[in-house]
Amino acid sequence: MIRANYGAQIAKPILLLTIASVIVSCGGGGGSDSGNGGANPPPPPANVAPTANAGADQSVNEETVVSLAGTGTDTDGSISSYSWTQTLGISVSITNNSSASASFTAPTTTEVVTLTFNLTVTDDDNASSTDNVDIVVNPVNASPTASAGVDQYVKKQSEVTLNGSGTDTDGSIIRYEWRQISGISVILVGSNNAVSSFTSPDVSKDEVLEFELTVEDNEGTVSEATVTITVLFLFDFKVDNYEVLWDSLITLNHRGGLYVAVEDFNGDGFKDLLLGGENNHTLDKTPIVLLINDGNGSFTEQTSTYIEGDLVAAAPRGVTGDFNGDGIVDVAIFDAGNAELGQDPVNTGNYGEAPVLLLSNKNGKYIQSTALEDAQFTNSPADGGKLHVKSASAGDIDNDGDIDIFVESGGGSNITGHFMINNGDGTFVVDNSEERYNELIKHGQTGFWRYYSNDLQDMDGDGFLDLVLGQLRRPNNQQDDMTSRIVYNDGTGHFSLANSVELPYTDWYNTWTYVNSLQPFDLNGDGLKDLILAHIRAHDIDDISVELTGTYFQFLLNNGDRTFSDVTEDFIGDQTETASATSIYGTNNVDPIIRLVDMDDDGHLDIVIAKQSISIGVHAPFIFFNNGHNYFTPIDSDIITGGDEGFGEDSYPIDLNGDGLTDIVTIHRMDGPDSEWGTVDDTAIVISIIAH
């Protein structure tokens, strides 16, 4: 039928063409001979379809980006559009699917799979063609991840849990295996489980144990992780109503132990710790860190959150007060320097960093003000604003509403003891004048008087702060005439030798002692401020080269007429045992700091020796209980420590959780990776002991 129609359609034009030819030959139509004689133009050539090329087949890994590089050609025109579609395999999302070049991410798979994609190209005459490409996706096994848990500090002979785990993003964990790789050998329980355990060994010093966890996935790939367990040669605190928080230990990456300030730095009602370090075996200065009390006995290191910039010091000494008058406590930090070196600033010996004033601001942070450094530099530019500081105290000496500072900095070529007068805006000026602080007080008759500790207290009840100075008395150093004294305020903030009183010497060999701290306390209930002096027994022979020995507490009764009587034997028992204090590290210097707190919650203040630099024992008691009549008796150290010598060094009484009971913070110093005490890699652990 189609073929017939096609023939009729052809015959008709032939007939018309014959007739036309006859007419032309007869001269009909009168037309000219130009052009093609009036015939129709030939038809255009047929459109040639474009050619699509989807590119070469590929073999790729799972989870990789795959490029689809297609092309299209058209011999008689141009390509007007491209279109990529997927026709086989795990569905993926094609990026730029209407361009010649497209891409997709190979899917995750556990077996080899093939994905097929078609590329369709269309030309400008709407003709199209298609080509396909195969992408073979190969599985790649992702290695498992092993976690051996966090490093731990544990007490000896305690149950220790190794909290391991393993994860595999493309499969499963089929095997766990714990093994010990260093340290005193222990027996692992459940070594083929994610969580294993062991009993820590009985140790005579800090011991480090290291363990490795291996995990294996379902495709045979393994991964390892290690964890360090440090078994502490530390106390087992025996006082019944106290508990060690072993799960709240904080590690300081330096030799910490100096309590720069114990204050509420974030306004939450709990005391926080500003801690520094001291290492006389190196010139490297250690960082000062801020530990924020979490309110439950634990601390979190948040130095950068509250303090702008880094703080370092060789041996920081802190003094607190509202120095800028905004109602928030600030901290003046003085650096005592390196005690093993000389006092010549050229070799940076006892000259530490310049003083820093941490001032609170409205943003809840502390900025580092150079006000103290600027004042010192202005007064003594040769020393670069640096000081050789022994101690400092703060108070409003001239009753102008601003907190001033007294600094004992005698030694070497450095400026002697002096006042730093607050200008009222947090800036200071050094006043070392004869009028402010009499030259005879600073230098004495021989020119070599020195003081070791000081405090600003109203000792005579006249409403003005007086200056209490603790002696630095030792043989053969032109300090034979040194004595502790009270220098009374004349009512205008000025102090003179004529307006002072010497305090009684101690009952110790030639009275060679340093007064490391002093504490006002009403011993007999008469309303007057008496004094407790904590002495370091300097020497028991006339030889300054002999090391310092133990502690001695002196009780001085205020007679009400600016004189004081030594009543030591009426308030404390025999002190023979504390004459020689030697730590487990071989040092003798106790550095006792007196704190009066109620340790047994009986309503009477007890004596706690805070920040002493050796472990407690009969030679260095930690707590002296008050019997209710201000007679103080040291606690048997074995009651507290169970005989362990590792406790008590750098301890501090503080209510950690706001329950009104006195808790304890202690710093446990560690040898560091080289296992040698007194080197630059020493570290420290902060431990909380909570009263119940």
Image (tube, rainbow, N blue to C red):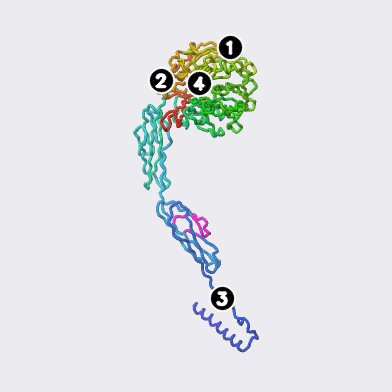
Going from N to C along the chain, the mark reached first, 1 or 2, is 1
Q: Position of residue 422 (x, y in %)?
A: 63, 25
Between marks 3 and 4, how big is the CA–CA gap? 114 Å
Q: Quadrant of residue 527?
A: top right
Residue at image mark 1:
562
Q: Quadrant of residue 20?
A: bottom right
Q: Earlier in the sequence, mark 1 or mark 4?
A: 1
Left or right of 75? Residue 636 is left
**Mark 3 vs 2, N-terminal side:** 3
| Mark 1 in CB contact with mark 3 (< 8 angstroms) | no
Q: What's the mark number on residue 458? A: none
Marks 1 and 2 in Cβ contact (< 8 Å):
no
Q: Is residue 93 magenta?
A: yes
Question: Which mark sits nearer the N-terminus, 2 or 4?
Answer: 4
Task: Judge by depth and name the residue closer to the eye, 168 or 578.
Answer: 578
Residue 43 tag number: 3
Residue 593: mark:
4
- Where's residue 299, x and y in %? 50, 30
Circle 2 sits on which residue?
Answer: 638
Tell me if residue 7 can be seen: yes
Cα distance between the residues tagged 1 and 3: 132 Å
Residue sitting nearer the eye, 580 or 78? 580
SS assignment at label 4: strand
- Tell which of 518 and 132 is nearer to you: 518
Separation of residues labelled 3 and 2 (CA atoms): 118 Å
Quadrant of the image occupied by residue 193: top left
Residue located 49% across and 64% down the image: 52
Q: Amino acid at mark 2?
A: Asp
Q: Secondary structure at mark 1?
A: loop
Specify the segment rendered in magenta. 84-103
* Neighbours of disc 2 within 10 Å: few (<14), some (14-19), many (20+): some
